[in-house]
Each structure stands twice: as C-alpha cells, then as structure tokens.
Image (cartoon, rainbow, N blue to C red):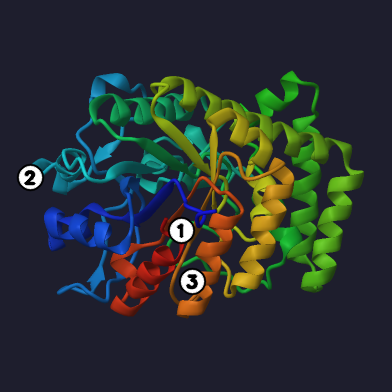
Amino acid sequence: MGKPMLPLRSIYTYAWDLAEHGLDNSFAEFRGLGLNSVTIAGSYHAGKFLRPRSASPVFFPEDGTIYFRHEPVRYGKIVPISNSMVAGRDILGDAVRNAELGVNVWLVLLHNTPLGSRNLDDCVANAFGDKYIYNLCPSSPHARKFARSLAADVTDNYPVSGITVESPGFAPFFHGFHHEFNLVQSNRWLENLLGLCFCQNCKNGAADIGIDAEGLQSRIRTWIGEYLAGDVDYPDDMAESFWLADVATDRELSAFLNWRCDVVTSLVGEVRSAVASHVTVAIIPSVGRPTANAWFEGSNLADLRRAAGVLEICLYEPTWSRAAADFADVRRRLGGSRGLRCVIRPSWPDLSSASEVRAAVSSIAAHGADGISFYNWGFLRRHNLRHVFEALRDIAP
C-alpha cells in the first residue's frame, strides 16, 4: 500500500512577492517544494509585514484592494478598489497562464475598512449603534451583492481552479483594525457582547423569524454599560462561564446567534451559486482559535461545508498536539475528512521545527484530508521552506 497523498498541496502568497521574485522563479520554487498549486490573494486588507527574503523586508499593502482586473458594471452600491499594481501588471493573469501549477484565488470578503468607511449603513453595528467600519455586515443586501459579484468576477475572467473565501461573516470584536486599544481588562463575555451586530438589516432579519431583536439589543446595551461603569473585572475562566450561561439561558440570544449562522450559510450558498460549477469554493470559517469558536462569527462548520463544498481550516497552534486536537474536533463535527482542507504555519509562532511540520503533514494526509496549504511564502525563512519540502517528500507516492 502506497503512502498517503494530499490531492491539493498549496502555498499562500501575495502578488507583490510574486512580482519581486519573478513568476518563473517563484513557480519553479513552488514545484521544487513538492507543491501542485498556489493560492494568491485576490482581495486583501492592510498590514505591516516582515518579509525575511525580500530586499525590502518591511511592507505595507494598500488597504482593502483587489489584485485582479475587475468589471465595475457587475457591482452595485459597493464597488471594489483596484490595487495600484494592477494598472501596470496583471500578476494573476500572468499566473494562470502557467500550466504547471493550479492557481487558487484567496478572497478576503467582508473584512474591508475602506469599503466599510464608504458604506456605513452596510457595516456591522454594536448594541450602541457604533459602526465597525472594518466589517461589512453579511446581512446587508449590498454587501451580499458585493460578495457574489467579487467571486463571479474573478472566476469568470480568470481560469482559476478555485477560490478560498475568508471573512464571510461577523468578525470577532478584537480583530481587524489598526492599534486596537483599551484600558479596561477584556474577557470573553465582554468581547462577545461587543461583537454582536444590531444594524438595521440584522434587526429586521431577526424580527422576521420572531426574534425580539430590539429587546435583545436593549438588554445587551444595559449589560455592557453596567460592566463598563462598574469596578469589577471578570476573570477569564469566570467570564467564559458567564457567556456560556447567557447563551444557554437567554432564549433570544441563543436564537439570534443561530440566526446569524443561517445568514452566513445562505451568503456562502449564494457565492457558490454565482461561481461556475467546475470551480472549487473553499471557506475559511474563522481566524479564531480553536476552529469550533467559529459559530460566534456565524460559521456553522457542517453547514458551510455543505453550502460551499470545501471547508479550509487554519490550524494555527503553537504545537502539533494542540493543532491535532482542533483537527480531530473538526472531523468529528463534519463526520470525517471529506471536503476538508487544512492550513498550517510552518514557522514561529506555530510549527517551527522540522519534526512538528512533518508530524502535521503526515497526520493530515493520513486522515484523508482533501489538501494542505502553507502560510505564507513571503513570510517564511529559507529553513522553514526546507521543512515544507522535507515534509511533503515524506508523503510523496
């Protein structure tokens, strides 16, 4: 019996890294590592990135832009912002003309600060009405049209093998904005209450199925207000229990959270329907840890796998033993590994040793996952890439 083989072996990367190193050199390196695909960012947010193999190690990408040539007529109120690179060179177009590797496009969907700032009525809003400009709300009809159009635009105009969709739902409170800061000790209870959306679209949608969204908003606004005005800090373990107790005993809150999952699942279904059937659609359900916490963002793992076809989970943990536990829990929730792909970081702060990377790759392959991806080419040092090569060599047929 032969060694297990992963159908998809990919690495995440950005257009700016491909441009700097050259497509021919980059793709030759990917093939040499044992990869058969590359996942290129097609839409992305801001950052401050350290690239150890670059002549310019510190890089600031343009916030909330797309890295392919789009058709503005496809979109409605919310129109994507083209990255300045695209005017000079279509990296994605050049990449898909390479026949030796499959090309997957990574779309950061609703996490977009420039578009949120321009479309405040389509943003997540907390119980006080504060707009979270970094998160277009998945219950907004305009945001949903934007999501469908973006996926259809890139897949209709570029012969890609698939898309990987990140941020299709409600972002956690502490995620996605510049210099997030406070002088109040945070905890899971407070963060989750602050992360609930009560924009008009959400309140209308919840009310349509009989949820008293206005009453729930008022109650949560009172809870948060009293906590912020008080002098007691909730310890982490107690706050976790308080949150779980609220979810279990407050029927409106529980129903509201389940409704959020229906909103995100239906959006993912719309994205899947907007894309040609031969193009794979994979969903990254959460950037939080562990993956099971994705339900707070509106990501019901089993439902999303059914809606899209593929679930791509980020096993971002400091050891493989912890990542293996997450992997096992997701398989339990899905009833196996069908339609499941994994992403690992073969470096600090996660799997920084050759043995850890080998253990991860061999285990993911042995459990019959549909694929593995490594994050992210431009961030990895030479010895990290060597660990990827050695781990993939171990499972080659």
> Taking 395 as reference, is 77 left or right?
left
Q: In the rendered view, tell whether residue 126 sits above or below residue 23.
A: above
Query: Local crowd at mark 1 within 10 Å, few (<14), some, or many (≥20)?
Result: some
Q: Which residue is mark 3?
A: 357
Placement of 149 over or under 351, stated as above or below: above
Residue at mark 1 to residue at mark 2: CA–CA distance = 29 Å
Q: Which residue is mark 2?
A: 88
Is residue 234 visible in the rendered image? The answer is: no
Q: Earlier in the sequence, mark 1 or mark 3?
A: 1
Q: Amino acid at mark 3?
A: Val
Residue 289 on image: x %, y % = 63, 61
Q: Where is residue 274 shown, x and y percent of the image?
A: 42, 21
Q: Residue furthest front?
A: 1
Q: Residues within 10 Å of mark 2 (few under 14, many from 20)?
A: few
Please report the residue visible at 22 percent of the width from the left and 74 percent of the height from the top. Answer: 53
x and y percent of residue 305 in the render? 60, 36
Camera-side residue of 347 and 177: 347
Q: Nearer the viewer, mark 1 or mark 3?
A: 3
The disc, 3 or 2, on the residue closer to the chain's N-terminal end is 2
Q: Residues within 10 Å of mark 3 (few under 14, many from 20)?
A: many
Q: Residue at x 14, y 56 (%)?
A: 19
| Residue ID for mark 1 | 177
